[in-house]
Image (cartoon, rainbow, N blue to C red):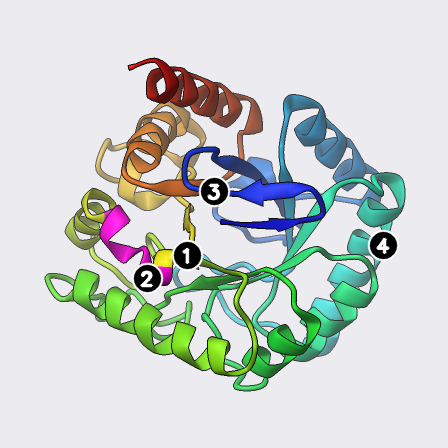
Amino acid sequence: MFEFQGKVIRHDKPLVMGILNITPDSFYAASRVKSISDLLIKAGLMLEQGADILDIGAISTRPGAKDITEEEELNRLLPSVQAVCSHFPEALVSVDTYRSIIAMRMIEEGATLINDISGGTYDPEMAEMIGKQNIPYIMMHVHSKPDIMQNEPLDAEAFETVKKFFIRQTAIFESKGAHQLILDPGFGFGKTLKANYDILNRLKELRVNNYPLLAGLSRKSMIYKHLNLEPSEALNGTTALNAFALQNGASILRVHDVKEAIETVKLFKMLRNHY
């Protein structure tokens, strides 16, 4: 358990993180933000619906996605983070980036936490920067890079690989003074369909050093491919797996659909508190 800007992250009081994609190629088209005004409308609605955290990302990390330059990422993020932090000064803003120099700039602009899909493996300077800034950090596991991660995905070995990754990376970050860590197993990031469900089924076993767990399941291929649907049709499946993730130890749900996630959390709390 730890607290930042009035929000307490603890295992029995889950938080909801709303996804704001300022990318032209995210896998779920409806989540793409088209302009600053569109961004502010979406952010405002998420906060009105009860989002605890807003997560702003400028790089699509869907399977097969190509990287963008540091300059392009900054050009997308800077006006977006400035606008959200200015219009919603009380909001907790997360920035989705694996570059420490970008992360540092976004912290200066008001970002509350950093969400790194590489868990510090793409940029070796990230751990030291996070330690010095004493800011919450989401450490996600990814197998390889997004453009090739599904070429040879992890299968039966996925769970143990992710756990060893968390043990190794948390030790590195702790050695740099970073102790506000949140662990994300990276559903869909270089894992087979079966591996994703194995990890979800054993999610609470990944709570290394009792750090909170984040589940990012929203409309992912592990849902829509298994059900022969499109991402736009995967809300019901997302809600079902989010409920299971909460039951299995998730402290944060990262979602496109805040209202439904908030309802799921409320029902989970009712079940947990009264039975």
Looking at marks 3 and 2 on the same chain, the residue that comes earlier in the sequence is marked by: 3
Amino acid marked by disc 2: Val
**Which residue: 40% across, 15% down?**
270
Distance (Cα) linking label 1 and label 2: 6 Å
At label 1, counting other C-alpha atoms closer than 10 Å, the crowd grade (few under 14, some 14-19, many 20 or more) is many
- Considering only order in the chain, which callout, 1 or 3, is on the residue closer to the N terminus? 3
| Residue at figure coordinates x 59%, y 60% from the top left | 136
Quadrant of the image containing the C terminus: top left
Foreground residue among 61 and 56 = 56
- Mark 4 to mark 2 CA distance (whole Å): 34 Å
Between marks 4 and 2 in the image, the one whose residue lies nearer the viewer? 2
Q: Amino acid at mark 3?
A: Arg
How many angstroms separate mark 4 from mark 1 (CA)? 30 Å
Return the residue at label 4.
Answer: 82
In the rendered image, the vertical position of residue 33 relative to residue 45, given as above or below: below
Rendering quarter of residue 211? bottom left
Q: Which residues are magenta?
A: 203-209
